[in-house]
Image (cartoon, helix red, strand yellow):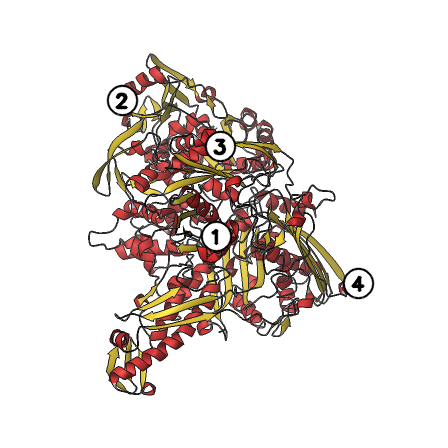
Amino acid sequence: MSGSVGKSVPRLDAEPKVRGEAVYGVDFELTGTLYAALVLSPVPSGRIIGIDTSAAAAQAGVRAVVTAEDAPDLRSGLALDDEPLFASDTVHYEGEPIAAVVADSLKAARRAVSDVIVNIEESPPVASLEAALTEGAPLVHENWETFAPVPGLPEWPRQGNVVGEMTADPGGVDEAFAGADHIVEDVFVADRQYQAYLEPKSATAIYEEDRYTIHVSHQYPWNVRSRTARALGVNPSRIRVIGHHMGGGFGARLDVGLEPYAALLARLVRAPVKLVFDRSEDLLTCNSRENAIIRIRSGVMNDGRIVAREFLCDMDCGAYATDTVFLISIPIFLAGSVYEVPSTRVVARAVYTNTTPTGAFRGVSGTYLNFALERHTDNLANTIAMDRREFRIRNLMDDGHRMLNGQILTDAGIMRTAFAEVEAVAPWADMGKGPNRGVGMAATLWLTNPAPGQVTLKLDVDGTLGVITGASEIGTGAVAMGVRQIAADELGIDPRDVIVTMPDTDVQGHDGGAQGSRTTHIVGRAVREAGTGLREQVVRAGARLLGELPDDVEIGDGHVSVKGEWNRRVTLAEVATQALYDVGPLVASGSYATPTPKYDPDTAVGLLFPTFPTPTYHVHIAEVEVDPDTGLVTVLRYVVVQEVGKAITPEGVIGQIQGGVAQGIGYALYEGLQIGEDGRYRQRTLEAYRVPIALDVPRVEAVLLEHPDEEGPHGAKGAAEPPIVPVAAAIGNAIADATGGAINRIPITPEDVLDALAENRED
Amino acid sequence: MSAEFSMTVNGRTVTVDVAADETLLHVLRDELLLTGAKEGCDEGECGACTVLVDGKPVDSCIYPAPAAAGRTVSTIEGLVGSDGSLTPIQRAFVDGFAVQCGFCTPGFVMTLTALIEENSKPTERDIREALSGNLCRCTGYSTIIDAVLTATEERS
Amino acid sequence: MEFRTVGSIEEALACLADVGDEAQVVAGGTDVMIQHMRREINPSLFLYIGNLCEMEGLTKNGSHAIGALTTHRHLATDPLVVAAFPALAEAASTVGSWQTQEVGTLGGNLCNASPAADTVAPLLIADAQVELRRASGVRRLPLDEFLLGRRSTARLPDELLTAVTARPPGERCGETYLKLGRRSAMEVAIAGLAVRLTFDAVGNVESAKVAACAVAPRAYRAVEAESVLEGSRLEEGTVAEAGRALVDSATPIDDARASASYRRHVLPGLLVRAVATCRERAVEQR
């Protein structure tokens, strides 16, 4: 078999995309579509006194004005059922939907939105983590006790504004601190980060035969199905979700967005309804990466050993719980790993505020957790005057490392290889030399999302292979390259002869969505499972056509041939055509979900996301230069060594690394969604919210460390999510090195850099 | 009051009658159904809506539509040859893994088409500067820059 | 609303005389369209002047006049402009992106009167005057008097800004514009500084012109800093003193882009760099 796995094969969806022909969610139109716009709360906190829709309803072209009165009286959520579709009595964040207008045109709908008169008695917002956690702070939800976990999820510790608390305390931590030579304590603060995918959110829905069909560009159509069903109070099978090309997502399109509104409106007006956000609505309401405060304290010995640690983290989930109650589990996987820390206590909390609900963004919480851990690691090394790299190697985990959840990492020693690879490409001693320059390093492990996937393979009469899967192509190429190449190799055909469906929840089996780098690993594995079944059928059918026994034929190069007789062969097209009337179509299915790794449930309380499956290992190094007059930072060099299991498409993986690092550079230096004391975002456009441009990002160097995983297809693990994780830390460490001062905030502003320089001068 | 005017779009003369404050982007997308130009920000920050007006790249999302009266507009749909073949820039994007989600791609291709029209051998710095107004959130830009370098090397 | 395209300056002036109060003049549209979509303006007429080629480009007819419809791209790349007004060319090259520079005009940048408008500071150091025409005549106003404050100018509703006249640097003179932003481009200035220094035969600063933007409601000439520099040989201490004077003259605000204190902090460093560049350019020129 020639094989495309391991080769960089250009993706087929690139052609329609460079031609401008690819239809994205915002481009999709149904005949007879009406357009909708949402009335968003102009204030972060207050009581709704009244909503007057009459003026809006009277506008030309307006078909309906919809409020909470027209929607099911339900609250739902990802983990906790706390969020209604429309605010009715109170508003909890600026941007919370209060009403919707449906009109003949998008312009008419948007115009009429300003004619909906909402009378709100404002109240002072709980605008920050500090404010929410102050004793006697006003409750964001006075009725928080009435909220129930989603069906199937057990209760967890929560109280008032603290909507989730995860505690892992193995005991003996304080005693371990008592024996330390030095105790180092740091506090780190991270602002929010907006995903800033280029295609704003949209949804188009139609209601027919008592079912809702929703057209989306979404990372996780099956979640749209279940979340929309729960928001509307109907069974999931009443919802059909069809995916289209997607203009990025980076986590923001994992939870439900505009879809339940579009569905509800389509039923109410009995016509297709399209709902599209403009950029400022999108930014204002987007489930951005949460802001957080991290307090970390470690005990270290003069010989360089870390002996004790306390890790406290507060994450701002905004006005509703969303997925943050899951994210408070993540610190348990990071706080005591990469470097051995024998005794570690972790407490993480998700906290309600009167701000836009936060949510998933590539490298969920890992970006700032790693920033805190790796900045702190530098501080530990500096405290005992040990070289920062040497200190890391000194404390590095090895094969058999036990994570704080009791999960054993059998192959953690690969991290040593990764450090050695970095040294080979970017020798520590040569980096960051010269005035105003610095070098920083950061390492992490990251998971491959274990959620299930399913694939059906069908061999068509023309010899092409159909891959019927609900997997979503978010842009990474996991479907367009990874799944396609893996499928092609099952029959030894050209990847161009593989046709992959778009997601349609009526057609395919459940898919866990484009998240956590899972698609190549999980869906690729499901392809292999299906391929085993399909190959058996092809061999039997081919053998019959050749007049041989199945054991005596083989598949390769688009043919079934007699073993040892290369010239006695039939094409796959001939096999499929003949089989059609002999045994029926050649179709086989496969499913896969990562088995839950063994762990110890007694290690923590409130651990809703208990394991870290299929981990990968990462070391980053950054070299920067700071401008002492302006505090501006230039990233001179950036090197990534990433363990990937097996790279199905090496250029594709490198593209993920380059893109992930660019987002990490944005996070570290340019972005930052700040919340004012008034509870409103200070950055409200892409002019004020700065995404890095081509001049800001260096050529990122990537080294792929192959280390095949037993369960992965051809050994592949997840690759796309983690490159963002260590970037802020590596750059932060480099800036701290260049300035000689503390760098404890994300984003690192020019003012922070100037302050760090000034601090160094004072010392 | 609406505005009626004619312009040449991808070689064809079209006459449209649109609201006086309409943008060129909305005319292209909603009236002419040329959806290759994308609306990413509606305020000239992201470049996803880039088209060429009289050969020059503009953000069509903030270009007053009636200002295009009598002018020549080129969109991504008009780039390919009559046989459907890709331009060297488009080909290099496909072969060079410069497309991920692809939503920004038409805008990048249009800006770069204008660039190599003006400067057939741009340096990496020239390319990065020319792309200041085109945001890509997926690639980190390196594959895009390499694609331009490849395309211009092959041209010369 | 109505979109009216005019074919001549006279036609534009007639229109403004008629309905100037309700009209919004549009050239490139890069500011106007955004403000219109955000409902910051609500005109009943867009008066489109983008076809008036007689208002484009630099003309040297006794004085140097730059047509109001000259685009930023033109300013940044036209060898005539680059030679005559290097700081203005530098400033224009930093306005937004290539896409916005292709259509955005000098006149639009001035009439928009953003505190961070890049072209204003380099024109202030060139003693620029604006030419305002109306159906019944023309008046010339120093740019300094034209700009009243944030988003406010002395243009009357029936007037059209048609051209800007300015004085190029003379002998033994160098000028530059420095812009500070977070990203490497696509930035609204956090601070901008235009400096023009003229030296005498022995290398003393004969005349100093310093203008700053984005650190006050409008760009302004920092006359105190100028007088510190004048007569000096740009000694380190003198430039530092001028830097302090520059900081004293600034009245920046905190906004989403940067804090007031940061804006103050960076000014002296920018001045050091700017005067060094001016000196180099003055020497090169010789």
Q: CA distance from mark 3 to mark 1?
A: 30 Å
Please indicate whether residue C213 sits to the left or right of residue A369 in the image: left
The lab-note entry on whether marks 2 and 4 share a chain reads: no
Q: What residue sits right under mark 1 in the picture?
A: A253
The residue at the far front in this view is A209
Residue A110, can we see it? yes
Q: Residues within 10 Å of mark 2 (few under 14, many from 20)?
A: some
Q: Earlier in the sequence, mark 4 or mark 3?
A: 3
SS assignment at label 3: loop
- Which chain is home to disc 2? C
Label 4 packing within 10 angstroms: few (<14), some (14-19), many (20+): some
Instruction: Pick whichever, A596 or A18, lies toward us.
Output: A596
Q: CA distance from mark 4 to mark 1?
A: 46 Å
Chain hosting mark 3: A
Where residue A661 appears, as percent x and y from the top left, is 49, 56
- Which residue, given by chain and number where applicable, does mark 3 sit on? A53
User: Mark 4 highlights which residue?
Assistant: A178
Residue at point 63%, 41% (across, down): A127
